[in-house]
Amino acid sequence: MWWEIIKNQIASTKGKTFQLDFNQPMIEEEDNCKERLIKMIDALSKIDVRDYFRYPYLDKKMPVEDFQKFSNLAQEYKFESGSVQRGDYIRYVIMNNIMEPFDNITEDAACHILEVVKKEKPGNFSFVYDENKEYYSLHIMITTEKLPEPLIDTGGLYILYLSIDLTDHYDHFYDEVCEIERLEGDIGRIFANA
């Protein structure tokens, strides 16, 4: 069977000439670091962190409409409920914005940033702080500021910030109100695929 396929292919190309252009690459080149970094940041900025929240007690998804706009920026939200006096106060703050585009980043700086983020692993992120399951903070800041020499600051700032404060709530933990494992997994996949 395979011989018939090859024989038919040879017969269909008989008498035709082909010219190979060795000036053109035979294999498409992989995206450069700058393009990959910009795609990664774009993917991160499209995460709607509100989609990961659940109602306490009800164990059902919390509608994104329950969050109030925190500022005029695209993705800044907050949610507050209860009171400290009753012991049921909860507060969530979310920010996910490209503050300054990375259009002018150098290739070397982009490669350095990609190397750093690829070392981060879900469940062990260096930018997560949690305290007794009552307080959770995730703060990703990707910037061209303070890069090691000889890399230069060309502008570019992305921030994803999430704060879950249940310290004044007597019977809930952050992993009950937010799907932290799924969120960190999604972020980790974006980092790994960059």
Image (cartoon, grey):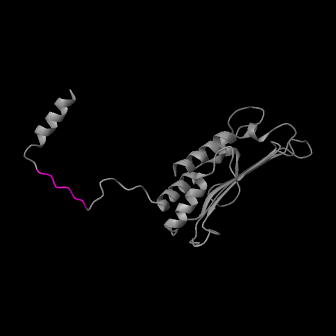
Q: How many marks?
A: 0
User: What stretch of residues is rendered in magenta?
Assistant: 17-22
Residue that protrudes farthest toward the right in the picture: 85
In percent of the image, x 55 and y 48: which residue is there? 192
Where does residue 92 sit, x and y in percent of width and height?
75, 49
In percent of the image, x 38 and y 56: which residue is there? 29
Residue in front for this viewpoint, 148 or 143? 148
Q: Is residue 108 above or below residue 132?
A: below
State whether residue 93 appears in this view: no
In percent of the image, x 60 and y 44: which residue is there? 186
Tell me the quarter of the image containing the N terminus: top left
Q: Is residue 54 left or right of residue 97?
A: right
Residue 102, quarter of picture:
bottom right
Where does residue 182 sit, x and y in percent of width and height?
64, 40
In percent of the image, x 63 and y 69: which residue is there? 145
Asked if residue 183 lies in the magenta stretch, the reply is no
Residue in front for this viewpoint, 144 or 19? 19
Residue in front for this viewpoint, 105 or 2? 2
Q: Main secondary structure of the magenta part?
A: loop
Residue that protrudes farthest toward the top in the picture: 1
Q: Is residue 173 left or right of residue 192?
A: right
